[in-house]
Image: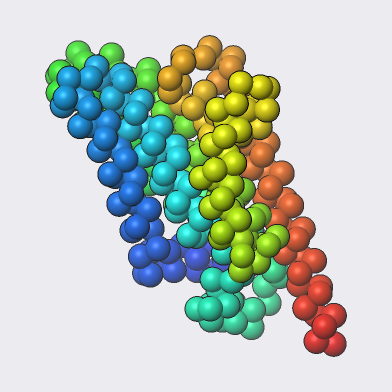
Amino acid sequence: MLVSVARSARFHARVAFTRRRLLPPLVLAALAAAGGLAARIGGLRPLHAFDLGVEWGWLLVFPGVAGLGLAAGAWGLEVESRTLTYLMIRPVKRAHLYLGKVLAVAALLAAIGAVGTGALYLATWGSGGGAELAAGLPYLWRAEVGAVLAGIGYACLLGLFGVAIGPKGFLAAATYVLAIEWLISRSGMALHWIALSHNLRVVAGVGARGTGGHALVSAGVVLGISVATLVAGMILAGRLEHRIAGGTS
């Protein structure tokens, strides 16, 4: 299992870079994060400018849009580009193939989100010299954790959309991330605790500064959603494999 999952992960990570699938969401995230830098130049306090760039750039736009492109199509994108055929001629179960893909996507999103958050920190807090950079460090580490969890959470959630719905998964996932998730996260009811974006903001300390206990609870919720959707996606991928085998036998 480990060998097949690692093979799938390497393949999909290579495809993401060679086909430049990460470039459009990376540009969008940079533009969103630049809004925070522009606000800082315009006179906004470093903390507020940093929050603005983190929330829109590295907690929402980049992991959400990149996750849509890399994970939500699950099988549809591979069939169109014939990469699924390339992988399926090897002894790799679909569940393992799916797991490798989601792990590769999650690792890429988490790593790029962490680097982007660090760059934003230097840009927004660095103008005041070493004292200002030191003052921003407590906010930086929480934002870094939030960016990493955002990459993991969106990769797992959007991958499930793709494998569950098929070629139409992209549209369904986009609707969820851009509309339903946003509405749930900003509802005044307890329902917002099931939304990734709300819990990611609590973990990152964006906006209202929750306590460390609140952040730990939200981190647990994000990881719980990630594990649950990852397992559900693997189960669905395995069932899809059995349906295909049954139809061809």
Q: Is residue 9 left or right of residue 118?
A: right
Is residue 152 among the parts visible in the rendering?
Answer: no
Q: Is residue 192 left or right of residue 109?
A: right
**Which of the 4 image quarters holds residue 129?**
top left
Q: Indicate whether 27 appears above or below 249.
A: above
Q: Residue at the location (71% across, 44% down)?
A: 228
- Find residue 110 and report its horizontal and vertical position in percent: 45, 44
Toward the bottom, the furthest residue is 249
Q: Residue at the location (59% across, 41% down)?
A: 180
Q: Is residue 83 left or right of residue 230?
A: left
Q: Quadrant of the N terminus?
A: bottom right
- Find residue 169 and report its horizontal and vertical position in percent: 61, 61
Q: Residue at the location (68% across, 22% down)?
A: 190
| Front position in the image: 197 or 133 | 197
| Front position in the image: 121 or 24 | 24
Give the mark count.
0
Q: Indicate whether 114 appears above or below 98.
A: above
- Find residue 22 and report its horizontal and vertical position in percent: 38, 58
Is residue 89 among the parts visible in the rendering?
Answer: yes
- Find residue 137 and report its horizontal and vertical position in percent: 33, 20
Q: Quadrant of the C terminus?
A: bottom right
| Front position in the image: 85 or 81 | 81
**Which of the 4 image quarters holds residue 166?**
bottom right
Q: Residue at the location (37% across, 17% down)?
A: 138
Q: Indicate whether 223 appears above or below 51.
A: below
User: Which colour assignment does the render follow?
Assistant: rainbow
